[in-house]
Amino acid sequence: MVVLHVLFEHAAGYALFVVKEVEEIGMLLPQVEQSVLSLGKFNSMVSLAAFFPFRSAQAALENMNAISEGVVHADLKLFLETNLPLSGKKKANLGVSDAKIGAALQEEFTISIQTGGAVAEIIRGVRLHFHSLVKGLTAQAASKAQLGLGHSYSRAKVKFNVNRADNMIIQSIALLDQLDKDINTFSMRVREWYGYHFPELIKIVSENSMYCRLAQLIGNRKELSEESLESLEEVVMDSAKAQAILDASRSSMGMDISPIDLINIERFSNRVVSLAAYRLELQEYLRSKMSQVAPNLAALIGEVVGARLISHAGSLTNLAKYPASTVQILGAEKALFRALKTRGNTPKYGLIFHSTFIGRAAAKNKGRISRYLANKCTIASRIDCFSELPTSVFGDKLREQVEERLSFYETGEVPRKNVDVMTEAVKEATDVAAEMKRKLEKKEKKRKKREKKLQELAANGETNGEAEMEDGEADTPVVKKKKKKQAAEQTEEAESVETPVKAKKKQKAEDAEETTDNGAEETPVPPKKKKRKSEAVAEEAEEEAPEAVASEKKKKKKKKTE
C-alpha cells in the first residue's frame, strides 16, 4: 500500500503530513480545490504526522538557504529519516512543492517523489491552515516567524551577492560615458551661442572645458583690458594665447549682445564647467573602486578599459568565466556576426583596442598582440575574482610580460618564460599578503585598546559621580592634604636658608687646609670674622622669624574659617 506524505517547509520548522484516500484525491481534483478552503473538510483528508521546529533564527535561515539551492540539509535529513517509513510493507510516497529539492531527496533516500497536481493543492491548503494544524502555534507567531525569516533571507541574499562590488563600477563607467557625450554636446552649444559675440575665440582655444571657462570669465569682450590679462593666463596657462585673446577682443567682428543674454550664457557655461569638474571626480572614484575590486586588471589594461570589460560582461565573475578568445572580441559582436554571415574576415579586437599596447604595435602585429593581451586579461580577471586579498602584483607582472612581447615583435629580443615570471609574482604576492594581514591585526588591536579605554573611562566616570555625592566625607581629606603641603614648603625654605651657610663653612675649611699643606703658619681666627658669622646667623634668624609669623597667621585664619 502506498501512503502519500507531504513535506511542508515553514519559517517555524519542517512539517510532515499524511494524506488519506490518496486515490480519491488523485482522481477528483475539483473537489480537492473546494475542500481546501474549509478547515473541517481539510482536516478529514490531511493529518499532521510530525513537526520539527527550528532551534533559532540562524538555523531557519540555513535550512531555507539549503532548500533554495536544492540541497538536503542535515536537519531535514534527520527529520525524514526518523518520521518517514522508508522500509516495510508501507511504501512512502513523498510530495514536495519544489522539483529541485525533490530530485535531491530522491537521490538521498531512493523514494518516489511527487510534485504538482494534487500535491500542489494540498500544500496550498496546508499553507492556508498551518497555524491551526500545528498545536501551540498561533497565526500571529507564524506571521512573525515568516516576516523575520523573510527579512534575514533577503538581507543575506543582498549581502552575499557576488555582483555587489561590480555594480558600482558598471554604473560609474556608464555615467562616465554619458557625461562625456553630454559635456561635448553642451560645449558645442556654448561655442555656437557665445560665438555670435566673440567668434575669434573658437580658433584660439579649441578645448571645450577651457572655452567654457573663458566664456564665463570674459563675458562682454569690450570690457577686456590689460588688467584682465593675468586672469586669462591662469585659465589658458599660456601668456601668448592670453595676449592673442586680448588682441582679438579689440578687433572682433562679433555682434553686440545684451546683458541678459550674457547672463544666460554665463550660467550655462558655469553648468558645463561644473559637469567637467564632476567628471574628473567620478574618474578618480572609478580608479579607486577598480583598485579595490579588480587591481590586477586595472594594472594590466587600465582602469577605464578594465571597467568597460566588466560592464560589457555584466560582472567580474562573468568576465572571469569567459575564454580569452571571447575577451579578445568583446565589444565587436556586430562585426563578428557580420563577418560570419558574409564569410569575411573576423575582427581582431574589441574593447581592448583602446589599450595602449595595440596602438603601439605595428599593423602586422596588432592581431598577435591583441590575442596575447586578451589571454593576460583573462588571467588577471580570474585572479581578481577568486583571490581573497586584492593585490596588483600579478597585474604588474603581466603588464611587464606584454611589454616584453611587444619588444620581441619589434626587436626580436626573447622574453622571459611565463613560469619564471609567475614564481616571482607568487613570492611578492605572499609578502604583500603577509604585510596586509599584519596591518589588519594592528588595526584590530588598536580598536580593542580604544574600546577598553572607553570602558575604563566610563567606569571611572561612574565612580567619580559616586564620590561627588558624598560631600561630607570628601571635604576632610582635602584640608589635611593642604596642611601637609604647607608644612613641606616650610621645611624646604628652612633648608634653602641653611645650605649657603654650610657651603661657606666648607670653603673656609678647605682654604685653611691648603695653607697648612703649603707650610704656612697657622693664623688665629680674628674675632671680627666670628662677629660676621654671628651677624649672618642673626640675619638668617630675622628672615625666618617673619616667615614663621606669617605661617602662624595663616593657620589661625584657617581655624576660624573651619
Image (spheres, helix red, strand yellow):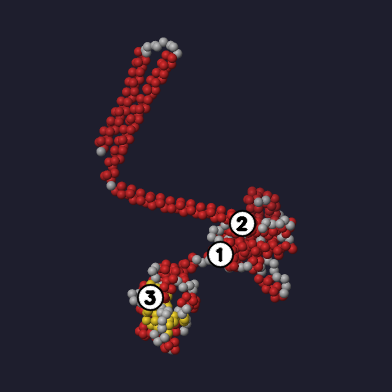
Label 2 environment density (alpha carbons within 10 Å; few <14, some 14–19, many ≥20): few
- Looking at numbered disc 1 in the image, what kind of residue is underneath it? Asp
Judge whether residue 200 can be spotted in this image: no
Instruction: Report if the CB atoms under discs 3 and 1 are less than 8 Å apart.
Output: no
- Looking at numbered disc 2 in the image, what kind of residue is underneath it? Thr
Query: In this figure, which residue is indicated by the disc labeled 1?
Result: 166
What x and y, as percent, mark residue 181?
63, 64
Label 3 environment density (alpha carbons within 10 Å; few <14, some 14–19, many ≥20): some
What x and y, as percent, mark residue 90?
41, 83
| Front-most of residues 470 and 556 | 470
Tell me if residue 42 comes above or below residue 557 in the rendering: below
Judge whether residue 346 can be spotted in this image: yes
Mark 2 against mark 1, which lies toward the viewer?
2
Nearest to N terminus: mark 3 or mark 2: 3
Q: How many marks?
A: 3
- Residue occupying the point 36% across, 73% down: 140
What x and y, as percent, mark residue 262?
61, 59
| Front-most of residues 246 and 211 | 211
Tell me if residue 59 comes above or below residue 271 in the rendering: below
Task: Label 3, secondary structure: give it.
Answer: strand
- Residue occupying the point 28% across, 30% down: 552
What x and y, as percent, mark residue 14?
40, 74
State the CA–CA distance, disc 3 to disc 2. Answer: 57 Å
- Residue occupying the point 40% across, 51% down: 452
Query: In this figure, which residue is indicated by the disc labeled 3?
Result: 51
Query: In this figure, which residue is indicated by the disc labeled 2?
Result: 423
Task: Label 1, secondary structure: give it.
Answer: helix
| Front-most of residues 250 and 494 | 494
